[in-house]
Image (cartoon, rainbow, N blue to C red):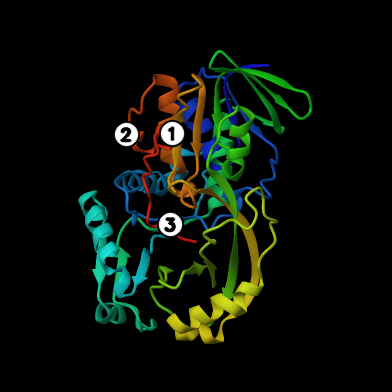
Amino acid sequence: MRTDVVVIGGGIMGSALAYWLTALDPSAVVTVIERDPSYARASSALSAASIRQQFSTPVNIRVSSESIAFLRNAGDWLSVGADRPDIALTERGYLYLTGEGGVASMRAANAVQLATGAEVSLLDPAALLGRFPWLDVAGIALGSLGTSGEGWFDGYALLTALARKARSQGATYLRGEVTGIDVESHRVRHLSLADGTRLDCGVLVNAAGPWAGRIAALAGIELPVEARRRTVFVIGCKAELPGFPLLIDRSGFWIRPEGRNYIGALAPPAEADDPDEPPLEPELDQWESQLWPALAARVPAFEAAKLERAWAGYYEYNTFDQNGILGLHPSLDNFVFMNGFSGHGIQQAPVIGRGIAELILTGRYATLDLNDLGIGRLIDGRPLREENVIG
C-alpha cells in the first residue's frame, strides 16, 4: 500500500493534521493509522478539554491565541454537508492562585502574556474576593485571571468533527497497530502493522500521543515522552457559585464547572509510577485524602461536595521541558514529530495540525512560526521550559 503521508495516531493531533493536509492539498494521499477507532483509551477522548492563554512561553501563547479563533468558528470550519458540529465552547477564563513564593514568577509570566497579546489581569486578595465572594483567599498573595480566550469545550466533539471532516476530504483511516518501522539511508522506507499490512510512504508522522516514545523507538530514536495517568473527578455541589472559572490552586489542584457539576483533578506526579503505561484505573483514594480537603479549604461550599464518579486518562508528558516536540528529525529525512504537549495538546491541535501540514507540503511553517518547538532542541540540550503545566 502506497500513500503520500502516513500519520500514526488518529487522536486530536493526527486528525487535525489529516484535516489540514487534505484541506490545503486535496490531491494529497493521507492514511491515518489508529489502533482503537473507539478512542476508549485516547487522551483526546478522556481530556478535560480546556483552552488558555496563560502560558510562560510566547510560542504557546501565540498558538493558543490562534486556536481559540478556530474553536470559536469550529462549526463553520468542520461542517460536512448540513452537519454542523457544536463543540460547546464556554469562555469563562482561567484563574491561577499563588502564595508569596509564586508572586515573582506569576508577574514574570504576566509580562510575557501581555507582551504577546493575551488579555490577563492580576488580582490581589481584595480584588479576588470582590469578584469571587465564594473564594477563601487564605494564603493567597496574587491571582491571575484570563479575561478573554480561555475556557473549555467538548473535546470528544472536536476530535470526531476533525476526523469526520478529514475523511470527507479524502483521508483514509485504517485500523491497525504499528509494529515495525524500516529505515534505510536516513529515510523511513515502510512500516508494518500487526496484521501483516505493509505501507510505503513519502512522509511518516508520529502523532501517537502517550505512546509516541514507543513509536519513535521503532525507528531507533529516543523520545522523552511518557504516559502519565491523571484521574478526573466529577463533583456535585448544590451551592450557587457565580462566575466560577477554571480554577488552578497553588496546592496543586484544578477545578471547573461541567454542566450542573464540576470536574477537577490533582497535578500528575513529578515522576511516573510506570513509565511504560500505568493502568487506566481512577485513583479514587485521592478524593478523600487530597482533593476534597484542598477544595473545601479554598472554596468552603465544597465542604458539602459529593463525588459523583471519576475517570482516568493519560497525559503525553514530555519529561525534557513539558513543551510540544515538532518537526523533522535531523537524522531522518521524512520522519515528522508532533508530540509531548504535556496536557495542552487538545487546545493547540488545530494550529499545530495546520503548521505540520504546511511543513510537509511546503517545507516551512507558513502561517505561524513554530520553530521554537523544533525537535532539534532536544538533541542540542536546549530546553524551552513551560512553567505553566497543570494537572
Say which of 207 and 88 sits in front: 207
| Label ID, residue 100 | none
Task: Report the amino acid beneath label 1.
Answer: Ile
Q: Which residue is drawn at 44% across and 42% down?
A: 324
Task: Report the amino acid beneath label 3.
Answer: Val
Q: Would you place residue 340 above or below residue 129 in this image?
A: above
Say which of 7 and 383 sits in front: 383
- The percent coordinates of residue 85 (x first, y second) are 52, 46
| Label ID, residue 369 | 2
The residue singled out by tag 1 in the image is 379
Going from the N terminus, do you reach mark 1 or mark 2 first? Answer: 2
Going from the N terminus, do you reach mark 3 or mark 1 first? Answer: 1
Residue 314 in the figure: left or right of residue 100? right
Q: Which of marks 3 and 1 is in front?
A: 1
Q: Which residue is drawn at 38% across and 64% down?
A: 92
Q: Is residue 4 visible?
A: yes
| Label ID, residue 389 | 3
Q: Which of marks 2 and 3 is in front?
A: 3
Q: Which residue is drawn at 22% across and 57% down?
A: 111
Q: Which residue is drawn at 72% across and 32% down?
A: 176
Residue furthest out toward the front: 381
Q: How far apart are marks 2 and 3 (CA)?
A: 22 Å
- The percent coordinates of residue 144 (x first, y second) are 30, 67
- The percent coordinates of residue 164 (x first, y second) are 58, 37
- In the picture, the quarter occupied by the N terminus is top right
